[in-house]
């Protein structure tokens, strides 16, 4: 059974100790503290990458098929989905659910990462990642930029 918000709430009523350690911090926090929209995370990663000279911003600008700002951010959202858990809603449902890693890797991100479309036409909306994952991404980005800078100074 996937760990949806409903399942997490049920586990909390039985005791937070039954929740896997990874998810314990999520339960009980207001939504605005737990989650960040994937489109906002993509923008933050892009801005940080440009500011630090990391590779992802340049790759997104050169390699995205759609050269518009939304297309560039959709490329960054695809980059984020490679190793980050993504949650979203599958209309007509409003229930947020985890999107499998393989699904996220094979999906096509649209509208700056607000929508993920699968090859069979299924769409996920209201895409989000945890704020913890966003901080991890930015930390990895800074480390990558530092390594690249050190390589270039040698």
Image (cartoon, helix red, strand yellow):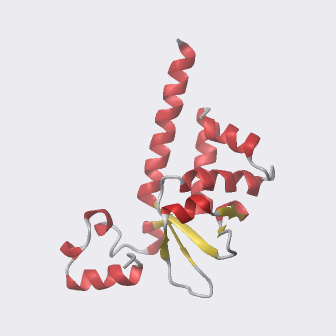
Residue at 46 percent of width and 34 percent of height: 143
* Residue 3 % position (x, y): 38, 75
What is the residue that sits farthest to the top in this orientation? Answer: 154
* Residue 29 % position (x, y): 37, 72
Q: Is residue 117 above or below residue 71?
A: below
Residue at 31 percent of width and 62 percent of height: 22
Residue at 40 percent of width and 79 percent of height: 5
Q: In this view, does 93 lie above or below 86?
A: below
Residue at 56 percent of width and 62 percent of height: 104
Observer-nearest of 147 and 79: 79
Q: Is residue 112 visible?
A: yes
Count the numbered circles shown: 0
Residue 107: image quadrant is bottom right
Q: In this view, does 71 lie above or below 12?
A: above
In the image, taking residue 9 as reference, residue 31 lies left or right, namely right
Quadrant of the image for the N terminus? bottom left
Q: Can residue 37 be seen in this view?
A: no
Residue 15: image quadrant is bottom left
* Residue 12 % position (x, y): 26, 80
């Amino acid at each position: 059974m996937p760990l949806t918000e409903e399942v997490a709430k049920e586990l909390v009523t039985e005791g937070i100790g039954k929740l896997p350690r990874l998810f314990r911090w999520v339960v009980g926090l207001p939504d605005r503290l737990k989650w960040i929209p994937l489109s906002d995370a993509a923008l933050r990663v892009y801005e940080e990458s440009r500011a630090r000279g990391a590779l992802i911003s340049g790759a997104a600008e050169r390699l995205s098929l759609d050269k518009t700002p939304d297309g560039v951010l959709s490329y960054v959202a695809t980059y984020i989905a490679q190793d980050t858990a993504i949650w979203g809603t599958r209309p007509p449902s409003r229930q947020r659910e985890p999107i499998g890693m393989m699904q996220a890797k094979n999906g096509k991100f649209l509208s700056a990462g607000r929508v993920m479309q699968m090859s069979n036409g299924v769409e996920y909306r209201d895409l989000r990642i945890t704020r913890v994952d966003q901080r991890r991404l930015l930390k990895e980005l800074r480390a990558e930029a530092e390594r690249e800078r050190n390589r270039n100074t040698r």
